[in-house]
Image (cartoon, rainbow, N blue to C red):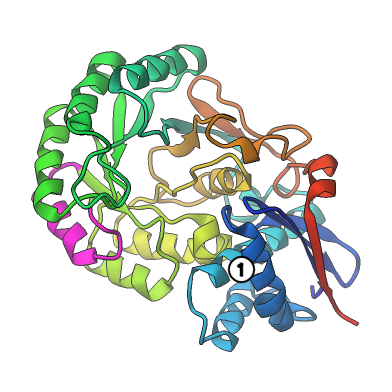
Amino acid sequence: MKIRSIETFCNRYVGFVRVTSEDGAQGWGQVSTYNSDITCEVMHRQVAPWTLGQDTTDLDDLLDLVTEREHKFPGSYLRRALAGLDTAIWDLRGKLAGKPVVALLGGTPGPIRAYASSMKRDITPKAEGERLKRLAGEQGFTAFKVRAGAEVGRNRDEWPGRTEEIIPEMRRALGPDADLLIDANSCYSPPRAIEVGRVLEAHGFCHYEEPCPYWELEQTKEVADALDIDVTGGEQDCDLSTWRHMIEMRAVDIVQPDVCYLGGIARTLRVARMAEAAGLPVTPHCANLSMVTLFTMHLLRAIPNAGKYLEFSIEGPDYYPWQEGLFVVSPYGIEDGAAMVTDAPGWGVEISAEWLARSAYQVSALD
């Protein structure tokens, strides 16, 4: 199957991709969120020239070809653009086969346990506990993630004492049986990260995400080696050689690739296989309700080393106004603490025509 055209529909925050094959079949995907307009420009400038008219049967090889042809630009934007191409091809394949992507990956449709993922640091621990407890009652969540420190905070807290307050407050509010996760977003030096980790262990937290600057793998490993709690990370990493090094040195206990940051499903499967060989689980990062969470749902229902849960953002239009109105029918709903992967072909979602009409459009096509 060869690609005849690649179309993008974007604003600053979201960029959808439609690929059309030489026989007219189509599939939809998405580049990574944030600066999606820049990423879509990269798609047309640096991805389309190497992929139009090319056979997509060996998707790994095609994505590697783009990497090789664009070897002077090995960074995040190229991977974020590749994600749009990759995910659109998977949708096209699913529609041609009449199967959901999860089936193409060797898995089955069905429920997947989710954790309620809070993105907020400007919320008091008491208010955070109250809203998470409410969600537990309304949607059945039994696992929850909150935020520690300040984002890339150089050991500073969002305000003095917040981290030390939120840790016991979450356990008090959510009870002894809840799975509690926390994300430091690259805040701490190793000594401070270990100090906070001891407090987390004392209150039964099970997942300590990105405690140190994510690019300092040796610092993260120092923390992981010192603590019993699972230290996790990897969402920002988009280079496969970095992933290989991270896994070989066991810098983390759980790997967290982001399908859209990393470059799509095919490249994420490579990381999942590396992790499987090392005996490490995969709990991907997917921090909003654009298509990235849908991609992750299909992935987790298919890989043998899937982690315990799906990240599921609980933030609405007050935090993510741009994620409203993306789909004709939202593919997201939580029942008894689980999201559902359906048996609809491809990704099983229809993008809103009204949203597309408001977007910036570009096309790259064969003559």
Left or right: 48 as drawn, with respect to 176: right
Q: Residue at x 67, y 35 (%)?
A: 324
Q: Nearer the viewer, residue 11 or 336?
A: 11
Q: Nearer the viewer, residue 37 or 272?
A: 37
Amino acid type at mark 1: Leu
Left or right: 4 as drawn, with respect to 15: right
Q: Is residue 225 visible?
A: no
Category of crowding for the residue at label 1, using alpha-carbon neighbours closer than 10 angstroms: few (below 14), some (14–19), many (at least 20)? many
In which image quadrant can residue 157 be found? top left
Residue 73 is situated, as x and y percent measured from the top left of the image, at 52, 81
Which quarter of the rendering shows the C terminus?
bottom right
Instruction: Label 1: state its secondary structure.
Output: helix
Residue 279 is situated, as x and y percent measured from the top left of the image, at 29, 56
Would residue 227 be counted in the magenta stretch? yes
Residue 359 is situated, as x and y percent measured from the top left of the image, at 78, 52
In which image quadrant can residue 280 be found? bottom left
Q: Residue at x 72, y 76 (%)?
A: 48
Left or right: 270 as drawn, with respect to 110: left
Q: Residue at x 59, y 58 (%)?
A: 35
Give the residues in magenta.
212-229
Q: Is residue 9 above or below residue 314?
A: below
The residue labelled by disc 1 is 82
Q: Residue at x 43, y 59 (%)?
A: 272
Q: Is residue 210 visible?
A: yes
- Farthest front residue? 159
Residue 264 is situated, as x and y percent measured from the top left of the image, at 57, 62
Q: Number of labelled discs?
A: 1
Left or right: 188 as drawn, with respect to 19: left
Would residue 131 be counted in the magenta stretch? no
Which quarter of the rendering shows the N terminus?
bottom right
